[in-house]
Image: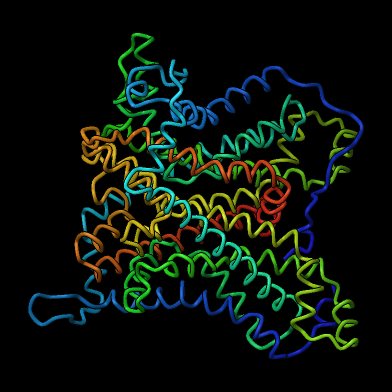
Amino acid sequence: MTRLSAKTRATPTAYLFLTPFIVVFAISIVVPLGYALWISFFRKQMIGGTVFVGFGNYLRALGDALLHDAVLRVIVFLLLQVPIMLGIAMFVALAIDSGRLAGSRIVRIGLFLPYAVPAVVAALMWGYIFGSQFGLAGQLFGSLGLPTPDFLGPNLMLASVGNVVTWSFVGYNMLIFYAALRSIPTDIYEAAAIDGANEWHKAWFIKLPALRPALVLAVIFSVIGSLQLFNEPSILGQLRPSVVTTSWTPNLYAYNLSFTGGQTNYAAAVAMLLGGFTVVVAYVVQLGAMKRGRLL
Amino acid sequence: MNSLAASPAPVHRSSGLRPRKSPVLTIILWMLLAYFMLPLCWLAVNATKSNVDLFGTFGLAFAPSFALFDNIGQLFAFQGGIYLRWFANTILYAVVGAGGAALIAAMGGYALAKFDFHGRKAVLAIVLGATAVPGTALAVPTYMLFTRWGLINTELAVIIPALVSPFGLFLMLVYAQDAVPDSMIEAARIDGAGEARIFWTIALPLMAPGFVTVLLFQLVATWNNYFLPLIVLNQSDKFPLTVGLSLWNKLANAGGVNLAQPLYPLVITGSLLAVLPLLVAFVFLQKYWQSGIAAGGVKE
């Protein structure tokens, strides 16, 4: 593509076109981020007002047992939920792509529809289904004469949150994988067929490698989403406040510190730490993927 | 960035042989589909039930009496009709936010694709880097800054952040590169057309499919947003549906059953009405979200 050659050089028009984006981007992202960093170095005190404490808030966060528990919880969540979600998504994408599925169009649309449902409504529906008052799950278990597991209890709450998130995002990830599969040129399959490859060979040696970039992207998005978990647990927590504590996830913790605890400066430090941690994890995932790619 | 990334129609494999359908695979996938449809079916069925039937009848069966219109009537009347206010707020936030975001992204993407200027690479790098920043880190400072700027409890507090779509900017950049020929811009300039006019009458129509994709995804993001409005709004007449429904759910669980008005049927009916517009839009605008995802997935 020879796009640079015909380009107009250094014109004020370009800046004018770009200005609206830069302005809203600065107001919504750059300035708040800088501000968060700034206030995270201060602390409000009863005596003496707001004082500079350097990395004091960060040191406190690193030693905060509540934060440790919250981070551990979302890490457990991401190690369990992300593989299940992406596994289902990949299975469905491969199944649709194989052409051996009847009614694949309906399956594709049906699985994607939950993406259009707000997390609040998704959590409400599943929360009511799992709930003890008029819950469908209880009715089904009851009709079979079985005791109903307490889906919103302390042991299963994390799994229930995982169920809601999986329900919401399998379709989205499936379509990302499916798009990657559709972009494989036909002649590769034809060449493989001539070499005597069967469907399994094709899946293993052609399709899975072709899915790698999409998979890396999906993993990174899912990791970011898991570490930021907020909507689903906070709605399910309304149904069972005793289970979802104010520090159940790091994001809930930062929110509650700031909006009910009045500890804004500390909340900013927690948020910055969580943000930094997320970026590092996403970066490691990407690095790992690149390294693996070279080895293969 | 791969120039093929945004081609709306991916390569289709249409080589003659069609594989036999597999009954086992079909059954597995249809069971999975049933699981994904279950909550929505449950919601639709239970929106037709009175409070007594909600508690007294099986969750996936219709009750003898059909109370959907009763529920809707009560929903629209409860607390002085605030649900309709939430609905109107949601439409306002989503339409202005998504429309503005798509336009801003189209202008920016066009500038990045068709002009060479100082700081072009820096803009790209900063925007790309910012996509990795979690929204969490922004919530608390956004609240504090918006308080300081007098934006808390205003429509702008929800709309301004909704105008930012880094994904949209990149998608429009790719679209502008592929769909708007440089020669066309040059010819228009020679004919004496101004830059703004070139953008509106030549570039934007050519970028329309990408524009609609960005619009659709940002519409969903804004319509479904909960965290940001929860933080920057504290008067219920400014709430979008998500925050309002969550408030009612909290009330219902905190013994709202004892109120004169049973709240669960309202939350359930209100949820159904809140998701319908987007579900309908997604079924009818399939080609746009599919091409958007194809572009997003192949991008890197």
Residue A290 appears left or right of A26? right
Looking at the picture, does residue B252 appear above or below residue B44?
Answer: below
Q: Is residue A80 visible from the viewing direction of this image?
A: no
Residue A138 appears left or right of A198? left
Residue placed at 53% from the left, 79% from the top?
A23
Looking at the picture, does residue A101 appear above or below residue B283?
Answer: above
Q: Nearer the viewer, residue A50 or B207?
A: B207
Residue A119 appears left or right of B174? left
Residue placed at 10% from the left, 82% from the top?
A48
Place residue A253 in its image quadrant: bottom left
Residue placed at 68% from the left, 46% from the top?
A211
Residue placed at 68% from the left, 63% from the top?
B171
Q: Is residue A84 visible from the viewing direction of this image?
A: yes
Residue B169 in percent (x, y) is at 64, 68
Looking at the picture, does residue A255 appear above or below residue A196?
Answer: below
Residue A108 in percent (x, y) is at 67, 36
Place residue A111 in its image quadrant: top right
Place residue B185 in its image quadrant: bottom right
Residue B263 in percent (x, y) is at 31, 36
Q: Nearer the viewer, residue A158 or B191?
A: B191
Residue farthest left in this picture = A47
Colour option used = rainbow
Q: Quadrant of the N terminus of chain A?
A: bottom right
Tag count in the figure?
Answer: 0
Q: Nearer the viewer, residue A66 or B137?
A: B137
Residue A263 in percent (x, y) is at 21, 66
